[in-house]
Amino acid sequence: MAKIIKVAHQKGGVGKSTMALNLALCFQDQLRVALVDSDLQGSIYHVKDDFPELAILSSEQIGDIPNLNYDLIIVDTPPYLSNKLTELFNFSDFVLIPTKAGFFDIMTIRSTLALVKFSQAKNTRLDFPVTL
Ligand SMILES: Nc1ncnc2c1ncn2[C@@H]1O[C@H](COP(=O)(O)OP(=O)(O)OP(=O)(O)O)[C@@H](O)[C@H]1O
Ligand SMILES: [Mg+2]
């Protein structure tokens, strides 16, 4: 069964997509990796053709995530709340929360952590280290 890492932060521009893409590229030689772009802006999905070796999936395939045949699934998320985002927390193993060290960046982490904690009530596998 795939390990699912979600990269999330409600604040925009903190490096979520950059981290998700770099993680996927880092592991793609050792593991079967899929990168899912759950952002409707689709910034990662739009550069799909630049990374032909990497399986990059669109936000429309989120529902399929638990059944995908990969070792590692990395999910990039948007800086806004959506039903899909909450659903994603329910089947993630690990949430990575990259952040800038600015006041508003740190303050916004609280709403992201509240979401994670809410989901942990249902999904006890969920872990959430914060990286600065
Ligand atoms: N570790 C880093 N150090 C410095 N700059 C970074 C780092 N990671 C990303 N950036 C820069 O920060 C900007 C925002 O990065 P990115 O698009 O990955 O953020 P994001 O959280 O996905 O944004 P959004 O919430 O809009 O989707 C980009 O210009 C990117 O090059
Ligand atoms: Mg992004």
Image: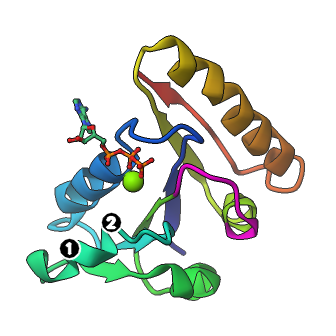
Reply above or below: 124 against 82: above
Disc 1: CA contacts within 10 A as few (<14), some (14-19) or many (>=20): few
Quarter in which the N terminus is drawn: bottom right
In space, the residues marked 2 and 1 are separated at their CA atoms by: 7 Å
Q: Quadrant location of ligand 1?
A: top left
The answer to whether 81 appears left or right of 1 in the picture is right
Residue 30: in sight, yes or no? yes
Residue at x-position 27% and y-position 76%:
46
Residue holding disc 1: 47
Colour mode of the rendering? rainbow
Q: Where is residue 53? Give x, y as percent.
A: 13, 80
What is the x, y in percent for residue 131?
A: 43, 26
Q: Secondary structure at mark 1?
A: helix
Mark 1 is on which residue type? Val
- Give left or right: position of 130 versus 47: right
Q: Which mark is residue 43?
A: 2
User: In this rendering, does residue 33 appear at all?
Assistant: no
- The numbered disc on residue 104 is none
Q: Main secondary structure of the magenta part?
A: loop
Q: Position of residue 64 (x, y in %)?
A: 59, 87
The number of discs equals 2
Query: Which residue is more in the foreground, 117 or 80?
Result: 80
| Three-letter code, disc 2 | Ser
At a point 22% along the width and 79% down the height, the residue shown is 48
User: What is the x, y in percent for residue 94?
Assistant: 57, 48
Q: Is residue 90 left or right of residue 10?
A: right
**Stretch of the chain drawn in magenta:** 78-84
Please give the name of the residue rendered at 43% of the width and 68% of the height, measured from the top-left corner.
Answer: 41
Say whether mark 1 is within 8 Å of ligand 1: no
Q: Is residue 83 magenta?
A: yes
- The quadrant where residue 100 appears: top left
Q: Residues within 10 Å of mark 2 (few under 14, many from 20)?
A: some
